[in-house]
Image: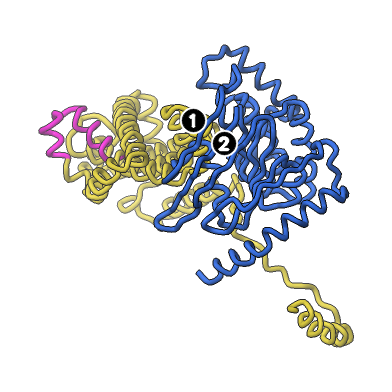
Amino acid sequence: MDLRLAAVSHAYGGVEVLRDVTLEAPAGRITCLVGPSGCGKSTLLRLMGGLERPDKGEALMLGEAPAGSLNPLTYVFQHFALLPWRTVEGNVRLVLEDHPLSRAERAEIVADVLARTRLTDFAKAWPRQLSGGMRQRVAIARALAVRPAVMLMDEPLSALDAQTRELLMDDLVALWGRERFTAVYVTHNLAEAVRLGHRIAVLSRRPGRVREIAEIDTPLDQRRPDDPALAAAQTRLWRLLREEAADADRELTGA
Amino acid sequence: MTDATFSAAAAPAEATAPSAGTPRPVPFRGGGFQPRGRAWAGPLVFVLLIAVWEWGSASGWITPLTLPRPSAVAGVFADLWASGRLWEHLGPSLARLAVGSALGLAAGIGVGLMIGLFSLARAGLAPLVAALFPVPKIALLPLFVIWFGIDEGSKYALIAFGVFTPTVVATYGGVDNVDRSLIRMGQSFGMPWRSIVWKIVLPGAAPAILSGMRVSLAIAIILLVAAEMLGAETGVGAFVLTAGALYDLESLFCGVAILSGLGVAISFLIGRLERRLLDWRG
């Protein structure tokens, strides 16, 4: 299933955050959204998943969600959004409880996604006992449990330290290699974008518009941090972003 | 730029400092503000207080006309226990407390959730609750007697009403403090409204509701006694009133001790409940 934003504009209380954005997230690929802070990346993601309604334009789903998808548009949040009063297992089960599944089916799905995110040994742990990276893996397991058609990831690694981020990026690459999931991945980190993105959409500062869409053809599992082609892509993206970021920064300081 | 000025200023100071004097330990300033369990301290205060009091009475320093001897009060309690009159009074009191608080808590949590969840309920009911909160509930007892009858009904109503207002305020305060991103998460996974309330909002508000219960159940005991003093033949309140009228200080103190024991027991039970329900906080 593809996801498309068609000529979307949006404003919060008179402040225009997005202007005439048209963007497509094709199935089976990871589309990264990068842009300076405050450019409306996260708003874009909320519009795509139906957590907010655009002022103008529309968010469209193209094609059918795969059979058995319980929640076609599924988010992974920056701050994990785990319920502290449920164990790892309970947090994953939470999103299955309202679907007509038998107890055994539910247990099977939970066990399966925990195994895929290598969390089986931590099924009974409380979120407070886990490191940030582990918590985000729980959130990813929870997202996988509802068999999403599109994963909407809002800066999923931003709250983590640099080493954990590297490890989780490897995990995501391995996961994509097995599942070929569709994702829209918002980040302000260009290294993440060139590592995980098949397409990278660069947004301008507020009001956000699509400045450019870059495609990176190197397969995800062959991308090395020292790959000169990736470094070149990252430098080119940074050149595009640099002015926007500097202007956005000045704007915020002035406000 | 700032880096350069920093190191330039720091370097000469560092160069002269080591020879300036004898090394002395950095003073520790980080203590306190960390309440920890000291299980022995509570009982010890009670024991010490009662021991001093007993000693004062025994030595004649405290006359039995102003304060009865703790051992005499204990004797009255033993008599009550042995004759079965204890349950004659404590039984009805506990029943009134249980029924009244259960009604008040249920209504309070319900209305508190509504105020927390619906803008219209908030706009309409929050001012009403603010207006009801400071009303001294005891003053309304005569009214409740007319509305709900002279016997148990009016007592249930008084206790329920007293428990209701603090519970409402605690509940909607708790709901307001539930992390919105968790609710957003529930919506993004397509959870139905009732599941979001039951599995996200209520557990998120539970700590606030439970600490509200500590306050509201203490109020319930006060109102229980007031109601029993104003019109009841049995109950701890009636027992205390009769003892006071007869200037039977031993019985009066025994009744008061039963009430404070009741308070301690309720506080203990809420503590257990908190540990059960909030064990995820660690």
Quadrant containing the C terminus of chain B in the rendered view = top right
Q: Considering depth in this image, is A125 or B215 the residue closer to the camera?
A: A125
Query: Dot 1, how many residues are within 10 Å of its Cα: few (below 14), some (14-19), or many (20+)?
Result: some
**Chain B painted colour:** yellow
**Chain A painted colour:** blue
Query: Dot 2, how many residues are within 10 Å of its Cα: few (below 14), some (14-19), or many (20+)?
Result: many
Give x and y (percent) for residue B189.
Answer: 53, 30
Q: Secondary structure at mark 1?
A: helix
Q: Considering depth in this image, is B242 or B7 the residue closer to the camera?
A: B7
Q: Which residue is rendered at x = 68% and y = 28% of the image? A: A124
State yes or no: residue B52 in magenta.
Answer: no
Q: Amino acid at mark 1?
A: Lys
Residue to which mark 1 is pinned: B199
Q: Considering depth in this image, is B250 or B60 the residue closer to the camera?
A: B250
Give x and y (percent) for residue B21.
Answer: 85, 85
State yes or no: residue B143 in magenta.
Answer: yes
**Would you say the residues marked 2 and 1 are in contact, meaning their CB atoms lie under 8 Å apart?**
yes
Residue to which mark 2 is pinned: A83
Specify the label residue A38 is tagged with: none
Distance of mark 2 from mark 1, alpha carbons? 9 Å
Q: Considering depth in this image, is A41 or A114 the residue closer to the camera?
A: A41
Identify the magenta region.
B141-163
Give x and y (percent) for residue B96.
Answer: 29, 29
Q: Specify the farthest residue to the left.
A: B146
Q: Is residue A97 visible?
A: yes
Give x and y (percent) for residue B228.
Answer: 23, 36
Q: Which residue is rendered at x = 66% and y = 32% of the image? A: A182
Q: Is residue B253 visible?
A: no
Q: Secondary structure at mark 2?
A: loop
